[in-house]
Amino acid sequence: MKKIIIVSLFLTFCFKSYSQQVQGQAVKTNVNITKQRDLVLKPESSIINIPLETDLTKYKKIVLSVEGWAKKANEKDIRNALKQSIFIVEKKDYKKGKTKMNSDTLYFFWNRSADHDDRNTTIIVRDSDMKVLYSASHTNVGRAKMLDFILSI
């Protein structure tokens, strides 16, 4: 009986040792190096479709609607940026047909898409009647620069 236990312990030890060596080799030989490519971006551009001509100081709140590429990350970053403005950022997002429209609230729509390496962003700000107060399209522009129109109020 002792011999069987000793033999089984010896085999278990050898098997564990061998499997660790095989696993270690597999990790070393399984390293994939991908071909590195250059990042080619279009030049930075902004097109203001509808300039901001409305006095936004009469508004107290902002409701967000963030769509498109990297939605959660963009929403978090936009919320944090807009907290630096004079507006109260509502916790709930805009839902068509479900959001209660208030005359003291702005409705901020952000849509970002990624085309190869380029980031295309559309921003639309509306009032409670869904009238467009501001509209802009940006390509490869930083978030701070895009939000400057509302943060500088």
Image (cartoon, helix red, strand yellow):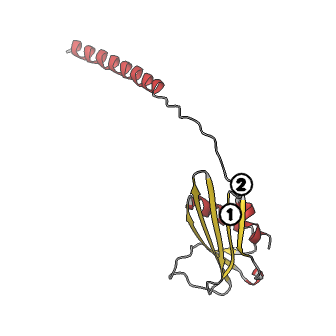
Of residues 127 and 19, the one drawn nearer to the viewer in this rendering: 127
Residue at label 1? 138
Inspect the image, locate mark 2, and give the three-letter code of the amino acid beneath it: Pro
Whether residue 151 is situated above or below residue 58 in the rendered picture:
above
Q: Residues within 10 Å of mark 2 (few under 14, many from 20)?
A: few
Dot 1 lies on which element? strand
Of the pair 131 and 151, the residue shown nearer to us? 131
Residue at 44% across / 22% down in the picture? Answer: 25
Q: Quadrant of residue 19?
A: top left
Answer with left or right where residue 51 lies relative to residue 76.
Answer: right
Residue 59 position (above or below residue 24): below
Q: Mark 1 or mark 2: name the one nearer the start of the chain.
A: 2
Disc 1 crowd, CA 10 A, few/some/many (<14, 14-19, 20+): many
- Percent coordinates x, y for residue 32 in the rendering: 49, 31
Figure check: 129 above or below 144: below
Left-right relation of 111 to 143: left
Q: Which quadrant of the structure image shows residue 58?
A: bottom right
Task: Give the residue drawn at x 79%, y 74%.
Answer: 153
Residue plotted at (49% across, 29% down):
31
- Mark 2 lies on a secondary structure that is loop
In the image, residue 5 sits, relative to residue 55, either above or below, namely above
Q: x, y percentage for residue 150? A: 74, 71
Tag on residue 57? none
Give x and y (percent) for residue 61.
68, 78
Give the mark toward the camera: 1 or 2. Answer: 2
Q: CA gap, disc 1 to disc 2?
A: 11 Å
The total number of labels drawn is: 2
Circle 2 residue: 43
Q: Amino acid at mark 1?
A: His
> Looking at the rendering, in which quadrant would you find the N terminus?
top left
Q: Quadrant of residue 89?
A: bottom right
**Image coords of residue 68 (percent x, y):** 55, 63
